[in-house]
Amino acid sequence: MRKNLINGLFLVLFAWVSFALANPVEQAIQRAVAENKLIAFYFKSQFCPYCSQVEEFVFSDEEVSKKLRNFLFVELDIRSEEGSKLARRFGVPGTPTLVIYDPKQDKVVSFIFGSRPKGDYLNAINRACKLYSIKTC
């Protein structure tokens, strides 16, 4: 009995450590699939003035942030290994870029690049909401 308990604890600990060390993008994909959500990948870079503009004037807007809550939002530094790999996969031309992705069908649903007005970002988000009939958008 005690041996089974110890083996069980080691198994749980191993699974937890494996999950914690796994790739954050893979974790996001697994979580999105489990929660039946689309992923909003936001590609940015540290010294990108346009990223700061989008974050300050678009993502901080109540209407935009409310709609983005319908997605699993993942922020990626385009210069990181993970970020650059995914950016190449999605054809991201630079920063800032928002890619709305369906992990179940492995396809990009909506895409917007650059420091654009709030309305342009809302259109990209609404396009994904409409395609997937997300009622809370």
Image (cartoon, rainbow, N blue to C red):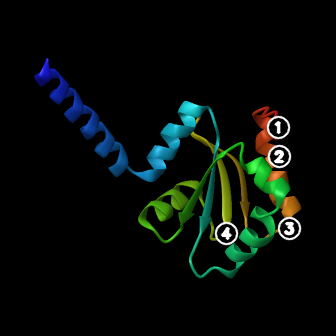
How crowded pointer 1 is (Cα within 10 Å; few <14, some 14-19, many 20+) is rated as: few
Residue at mark 3 to residue at mark 4: CA–CA distance:
13 Å
Helix, strand or loop at label 2? It is: helix
Which residue position is annotated with label 1? 130
Whole-percent x and y of residue 132?
75, 34
Residue at 67%, 44% in the rendered image: 71
Whole-percent x and y of residue 2?
13, 22
Relative to 111, is 54 above or below?
below
Kind of residue at badge 2: Asn
Pointers 2 and 3 in contact (C-beta within 8 Å):
no
Helix, strand or loop at label 3? It is: loop
Whole-percent x and y of residue 103?
57, 39
Q: Name the side, left or right, on which 16 lies relative to 73.
A: left
Q: Which mark is residue 96?
A: 4
Residue at mark 2 to residue at mark 1: CA–CA distance:
6 Å
Of the two numbered discs 2 and 3 on the same chain, state the one appearing first in sequence: 3
Residue at mark 3 to residue at mark 1: CA–CA distance:
20 Å
Residue at 51%, 57% in the rendered image: 86
Of the two numbered discs 1 and 4 on the same chain, state the one appearing first in sequence: 4
